[in-house]
Amino acid sequence: MVVDVRKIENGVKVGQKISAEEFVRLLGENPRTIEISSSVLKQSKNISLIMKVLETATVHGVPDIIITERGKPPTVLELRGKIFDPINPFVRAQVGYRPEPEERILVHLLDRRQREVPISELVPGEIELLSKLEKENQVEIIKDGLKVKLTELGATIARGAKKMYPEYWK
C-alpha cells in the first residue's frame, strides 16, 4: 500500500489513511514530527494498534504527533521523553470507548475479588486468550487446581482499563 507521506520542515505530513504497519515504518525513519489530519487519522486502519505502537515506542522516544483539523488550532500529542497518556481525551475519542478483549478479561478477574478463579467459570472466549495473557505475564495459570490468577502487571492493566473506560463498566 502506497501512503501519501510528504517531507515537511521538521518531519513528515501524512496525506491519506495509514495502516499500523506503515505507521511503524514511518516511526522507523525517526522524523522530528508527524503531522496528520484528524479525518485521515479516523479513517486509518487499526487505530488502536497505532496508539499501542506509540505507547510502546515512547520508551525509545517518538516524534510529536500533530493532529490538524480545519478551523481549529492543531492538537499536539507531545510524547518525546514523556509517558504516553492513553487517558488523554483526544486519544480516547480517536481510539474509541471499547476496551480490548484482553482488558475485559483482566477487569473481569479483578472484579471477582478472589485470588484464584477456576478456569471452568470463564467463558470459552476468555479461556482462548489465557495463554496469550500468560505469555505477556498478565495472568498466572495454576495447573494443579485449574485456576487462573492475576499477576501484579495484569491487575495494574485492569485498574487502568477501568479508569480509561468508566462508562463501559457501569
Image: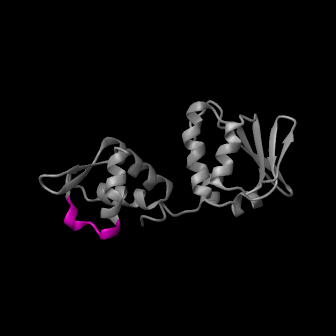
Q: In which quarter of the image is residue 110?
A: bottom left
**Farthest front residue in view:** 1
Instruction: Give the percent coordinates (x, y) of residue 94.
Output: 65, 58
Q: Which of 92 and 5 is in front in this view?
A: 5
Compare residues 84 and 169 and report the one nearer the observer: 84
- Residue 29 at least partly seen: yes
Residue 127 lies, in percent from the top left, at 30, 63
How would you classify the magenta stretch by its main secondary structure?
Answer: helix
Q: Name the outermost residue toward the left.
A: 144
Quarter of the image for the N terminus: give it.
bottom right
Residue 62 versus residue 36 in the image, above or below: above
Query: Residue 107 at what x, y percent from top left?
Result: 36, 57
* Residue drawn at the location 77% of the way across and 54% of the way down: 3
Is 149 colored magenta in this rendering? no
The residue that appears at 33% across and 63% down in the rendered structure is 128
Residue 78 location in percent, x, y?
Answer: 68, 38
Q: Tell me the magenta residue range.
A: 118-125
Tell whether 35 sits left or right of 21. Answer: right
Task: Using the image, determine if residue 49 lies above or below residue 80.
Answer: below
Residue at point 32%, 54% (across, down): 131
